[in-house]
Image (cartoon, helix red, strand yellow):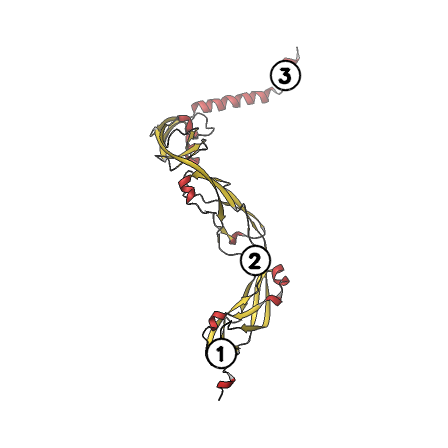
């Protein structure tokens, strides 16, 4: 029995300080000034649980005015962080309906003492149509360029490549693909995985799953390889009755640029520098023409830069035509 008083007296100064702090905090809350604040454009979101129906357009109105009351500190925080009116629809009875706003639908979080004084307007108009589900591919967009010392060592890999969209039949019927937010190649400093959000602009009440995709990027140091005296090939193609075609210059230099492992391991025997056959069309004997070159046989992700982009071609005169 002597133990209970001892529990009360042990570290009595710490216990007394804790009690005093509790009383102080309670008094501070009780004396904190109350405030009322008007939130003029709070967005309305609608959650439809009835899987047979989907919202066919934005709620009317799409925003409401809230009058909130409570401790000034909590009201200030809520004004900074924002709030919303979340309308739950368990079942749909008709294509067009109105719902009376319930104050508990206002999302104030765990803000102690915050109360909803009023919502204006007090009713929300909703329009529904039968729901549909569709799988659509994702469209990836890139912008910018890799840093000057880097190059892609493999194609960009996107996962998943498609998403499931559930929403109004009329909207999904026109939906071909969904775009991802642009990926800035300039932000890449090493190989890695990047998360991209799906752009849901214009989808109305449609639900997208998943809302993100993962992009795999593999880079290596940039490598250059220079080839000299690569022959230029020219072929007029089938159906052209021409004598031998003379190309000047007959060889060009070639600079290959790409990821180190790709450039060093490439099979040079597959490379060809050619004159596009279409550029030789209707070339008559003795005619001189300036034509562009193109490089064939390049592996993906390697770029070739000829020492000259154009050459001169002419068709030799037939022996029978020589004087």
Q: Earlier in the sequence, mark 3 or mark 1?
A: 3
User: Measured along the vertical axis of the image, is residue 1 above or below residue 153?
Assistant: above
Residue marked by disc 1: 314
User: Quick one: 249 or 63, which is closer to the camera?
Assistant: 249
For marks 2 and 3, give the one nearer the viewer: 2
Q: CA distance from mark 3 to mark 1?
A: 110 Å
Within 10 angstroms of label 3, few (less than 14), some, or many (20 or more) residues? few
Task: Using the image, determine if residue 112 lies above or below residue 284.
Answer: above
Left or right? Give the position of 238 relative to 72: right
Q: Give the numbered dot on residue 102.
A: none
Describe the element under mark 1 as helix, strand or loop: strand
In percent of width and height, residue 87 lies at 41, 30
Q: Residue at x 59, y 70 (%)?
A: 227
In the rendered structure, which disc, 2 or 3, sits on the residue that comes first in sequence?
3
Residue at which label 2 appears: 151
Q: Nearer the viewer, residue 83 or 15?
A: 83
Characterize the local packing of mark 1: few (<14), some (14-19) or many (20 or more) Cα atoms within 10 angstroms. many
Location of residue 288 in the rendering, given as x and y in whole percent from the top left corner: 46, 78
Q: Which mark is residue 7?
A: 3
Q: Is residue 180 left or right of residue 297?
A: left
Residue 237 on image: x %, y %: 51, 71
* Mark nearer the viewer, 1 or 2: 1
Circles 1 and 2: CB atoms closer than 8 Å: no
- Please, which residue is most extreme toward the front here? 239
């Amino acid at each position: 029995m002597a133990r209970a008083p001892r529990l009360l007296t042990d570290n009595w100064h710490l216990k007394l300080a804790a009690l005093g702090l509790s009383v102080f905090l309670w008094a501070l809350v009780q004396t904190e000034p109350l405030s009322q604040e008007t939130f003029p454009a709070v967005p309305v979101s609608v959650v439809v649980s009835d899987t047979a129906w989907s919202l066919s357009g934005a709620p009317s109105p799409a925003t409401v005015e809230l009058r909130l009351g409570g401790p000034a500190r909590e009201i200030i925080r809520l004004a900074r962080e924002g709030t919303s009116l979340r309308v739950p629809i368990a079942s749909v009875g008709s294509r067009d309906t109105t719902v009376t706003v319930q104050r508990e639908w206002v999302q104030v979080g765990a803000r102690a003492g915050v109360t909803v004084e009023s919502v204006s307007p007090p009713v929300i108009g909703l329009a529904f149509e039968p729901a549909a589900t569709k799988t659509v591919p994702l469209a990836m967009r890139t912008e910018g360029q890799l840093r000057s010392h880097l190059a892609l060592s493999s194609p960009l890999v996107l996962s998943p490549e498609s998403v499931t969209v559930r929403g109004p039949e009329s909207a999904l019927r026109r939906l071909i693909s969904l775009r991802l937010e642009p990926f800035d190649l300039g932000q890449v400093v090493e190989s890695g995985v990047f998360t991209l959000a799906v752009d849901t602009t214009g989808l109305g009440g449609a639900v997208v799953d998943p809302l993100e995709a993962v992009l795999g990027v593999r880079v290596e140091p940039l490598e250059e390889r220079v080839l000299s005296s690569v022959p230029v090939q020219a072929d007029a193609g089938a159906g052209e009755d021409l004598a031998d075609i003379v190309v000047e210059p007959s060889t060009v230099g070639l600079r290959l640029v790409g990821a180190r492992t790709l450039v060093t391991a490439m099979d040079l025997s597959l490379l060809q520098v050619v004159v596009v056959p279409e550029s030789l069309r209707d070339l008559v004997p003795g005619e001189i023409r300036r034509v562009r070159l193109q490089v064939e046989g390049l592996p993906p992700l390697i770029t070739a830069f000829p020492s000259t982009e154009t050459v001169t071609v002419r068709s030799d005169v037939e022996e029978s035509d020589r004087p």
